[in-house]
Amino acid sequence: MSIYQNIIQSAEENKKLLAILIDPEKIALEHVPHLISRIKKSPATHILVGGSTFDGQNLDDLISGLKKHCDLPVLLFPGGFQQISAQADGILFLSLLSGRNPDYLIEHQVRSVPYLEQTRLEVIPTGYLLIESGKETAVARVSQTLPLSRENIEYVSQTAKAGEYLGKKLIYLEAGSGAKHAVPIEMIRRVKDALNIPLIVGGGIRSKNAIEEAFNAGADMVVIGTAFENDNTFFDV
Ligand code: 1GP
């Protein structure tokens, strides 16, 4: 079964998915085995790898290290076309639909094609929506785009639906790594209601309670980066 089919099936069966995001700039290769031992003790179902400012150096080594010690699917979550590795299982092929910068809507995607064609990565078209979160995030800074207002849920919902109509297979509501405020619960609920494709939510989620709330509102997958980065025992009971 493909990674995407598995996400669809889980969404249909209301089995919630949890992804741990690894920012390659924040992990030294020698720490990968320890990191993996912690991930294995967590409820994670997927590993995402990527970052807004990462230049792609040593990405192959990092991902083969992860794959060597762990069976979870590894998905690239690229901040740019340099972040492609054939060692991963798939790629969230992101288009920043909340922004109006053509570089992040299509240019990076075009430039990634020669790299992607040398891999067997499962490519999952993903509409990526940056939501205002109380402070400027790396995604906004690097992409030079404005996030969508937290107040205008209708517009966020319309943007997500436009992504679905454009053929995206997933929608990712992103508050940004280390966000002050996570995506509002009511926004998750309304976007989920509007969509017929699975919904990923991430950014600024720092507690198990917040994970549960996002799931209950309709997130099919929640992404945890900073909270696990800061405390590898985050998921321990
Ligand atoms: C960022 O959604 C992810 O792209 C995770 O964010 O680091 O705040 O958990 P955090």
Image: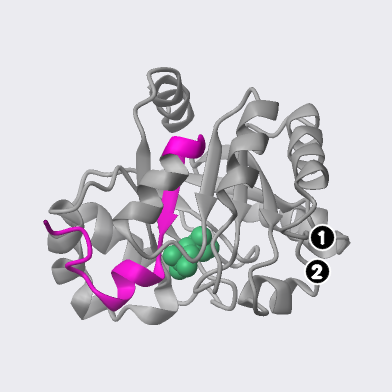
At label 1, the amino acid type is: Gly
Q: Is residue 194 above or below residue 183?
A: above
Question: Foreground: 23 or 157?
Answer: 157
Residue type for callout 2 = Leu
**Residue 182: image x %, image y %?**
54, 61
Residue highlighted by disc 2: 146
Element at label 1: loop
Q: Residue at x 77, y 59 (%)?
A: 148
Where residue 25 sits, quadrant-wise, is bottom left
- Which quadrant would the N terminus be assigned to in this image? top left
SS for callout 2: loop
- Residue 11 appears in which quarter of the rendering? top left
Q: Is residue 102 magenta?
A: no
Crowd rating for badge 2 (residues with CA inside 10 Å; few <14, some 14–19, many 20+): some
Q: Give residue 64's mark.
A: none
Q: Is residue 117 visible?
A: no
Residue located at (67% from left, 51% from top): 128
Q: Nearer the viewer, residue 111 or 48?
A: 48
Q: Which residues are magenta?
A: 216-237
- Determine whether, in the image, residue 34 is placed left or right of residue 149: left
In the image, residue 196 lies at what x, y percent? 64, 22
Q: CA distance from mark 2 to mark 1?
A: 6 Å
Which residue is the site of mark 1? 99
**Image spot of residue 219 (x, y percent):** 49, 39
Confirm whether residue 83 shows in the render: yes
